[in-house]
Amino acid sequence: MARLNLLEETRYEKLPVTVYNNQQDASLAVAARIAKLIKDKEAKGEKTVLGLATGVTPIGVYAELVRLHKEESLSFKNVITFNLEEYYPMQPNAAQSYVTFMNENLFNHVDIDKKNVHIPDGTLTQDDVAAFCLDYEQKITKLGGLDLQILGIGRTGHIGFNEPGSAPNSGTRLVTLDDLTRNDASRDFGGKQNVPTKAITMGVGTIFKAREIILMAWSQKKAPIVKKAVEGEISGEVPATYLQLSDHVEFVLDEAAASSLTRFNTPWLVKDCSWENGLKKKAVIWLADTLDKPILKLTEEDYNNHGMAQLAVEQGPVYNINIDIFTQSSVSFRRFNAAIITLKQTRWVPLGSAKSPAANTWWGFTFCNKSMVNCMSSSPTVFFLIFPVS
Ligand code: PGA
């Protein structure tokens, strides 16, 4: 199992995660680590064997490595690289090939010996692929293994092109790309129909053998899959979860990619909070949603059992907190009586009832489901129908 985690705040996280303010800062930090590794090994007269990734994610790292080469004399003469993957089939000089990507973003701008560059060959015949893959693995092994592997993560949870269903001991091989992965690549290819259906990728097992693994993810788009990879159960459905088994992995994230992790999304579950109104509102609405209960029916026990005891103590009794958040939920509903009824079978919730000034009749309001209630503060215009309660 991975390193012990001694922090309560990150207790849901099953591998080490470092969060930077933005992807620029994170990219600089990763590039600095790579540069240090290269220099340290160079000082010992050793070569550095790097596992490299393609895609949008590592571009900032490569840009910084190029800068370090040009301005701070970082040399790549002693660097040997193995790329994670290449589309299949793919001509190396095609605009979308990972050979082109690596040349444009790194290799053409540094002093690496092109003989030391390895990228899976997208021009092979099907018959030659297996032997090529075996040779790729053997070359890495003969060089003493990868010192450092950098990774992005696909929205399927893939690392390299190890799509859902990949085995933890998989090696370099020909694989079929997931539909979502092809969707994500369609812009580069001018349409999904042009994206190859296959690729040659290093395996999960190949990656796993690297002495150090850094997975990077930026932007909100990656937040849901990052949460699964970091906090979810280990499963072939999300191949990145296999990294939880490594003792030498680190996830490097920007704030947006980290935003769904428990410590950021529902911090009251893992630490004491400063309960300003925005957080209080988020927590109470979350509690109602989690328990599938109307806000006004939340009890002290509900608060205590869901990490919100501190809020109850500081600002309780909970009845008052409930009323406070309920009234804030939508300005348009403030005046309504609090008689809330949950129609369990439909999840449609009458939001309240009010006395009609004209007819002296009580009315219920419906056609607002729970998620609409929860988002009312950000979108106060809600369409609903009214019906007589009695
Ligand atoms: P991206 O892709 O860097 O373009 O987001 C990452 C990946 O698919 O592994």
Image (tube, rainbow, N blue to C red):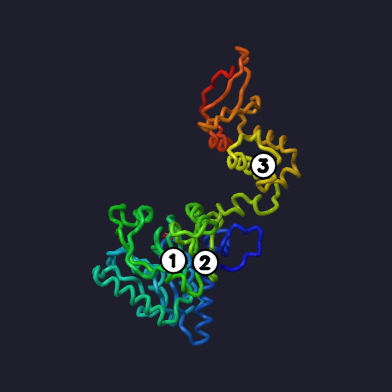
Using the numbered discs, state the Cα–Cα distance from disc 3 to disc 2 in whole angstroms: 34 Å
Q: Decide: is 348 above or below 145.
A: above
Say the numbered circle drawn on residue 302. Answer: 3
- Does dot 3 land on a helix, a strand or a loop? helix
Of 268 and 66, nearer the camera is 268
Residue carrying label 1? 168
**CB at disc 2 and ligand 1 closer than 8 Å:** no
Q: Quadrant of residue 56?
A: bottom left
Tell me which image quadrant ligand 1 sits in.
bottom left
Q: Which amino acid does label 3 sit on?
A: Asp
* Mark 2 in CB contact with mark 1 (< 8 angstroms): yes
Sooner in the amino-acid sequence: mark 3 or mark 2: 2
Q: What residue type is labelled 1?
A: Pro
Q: How crowded is mark 3: few (under 14 residues within 10 Å), some or many (20 or more)?
A: some
The percent position of residue 156, horizontal first and vertical second, equals: 42, 55
Q: Decide: is 198 above or below 221.
A: below
* Mark 1 in CB contact with mark 3 (< 8 angstroms): no
Residue carrying label 2? 245
- Does dot 2 land on a helix, a strand or a loop? helix
The percent position of residue 24, horizontal first and vertical second, equals: 52, 62
Using the numbered discs, state the Cα–Cα distance from disc 2 to disc 1 in whole angstroms: 10 Å
Q: Quadrant of residue 206?
A: bottom left
Of 33 and 201, nearer the camera is 201
Say the numbered circle drawn on residue 198. Answer: none
Q: How crowded is mark 1: few (under 14 residues within 10 Å), some or many (20 or more)?
A: many
Q: In which quarter of the image is residue 344?
A: top right
Q: Which amino acid does label 2 sit on?
A: Leu
Q: Decide: is 52 above or below 277.
A: below
Of 270 and 257, nearer the camera is 270
Using the numbered discs, state the Cα–Cα distance from disc 1 to disc 3 in whole angstroms: 40 Å
**Going 44% across and 66% down the picture, which residue do you hit?**
168
**Going 38% across and 80% down the picture, which residue do you hit?**
113
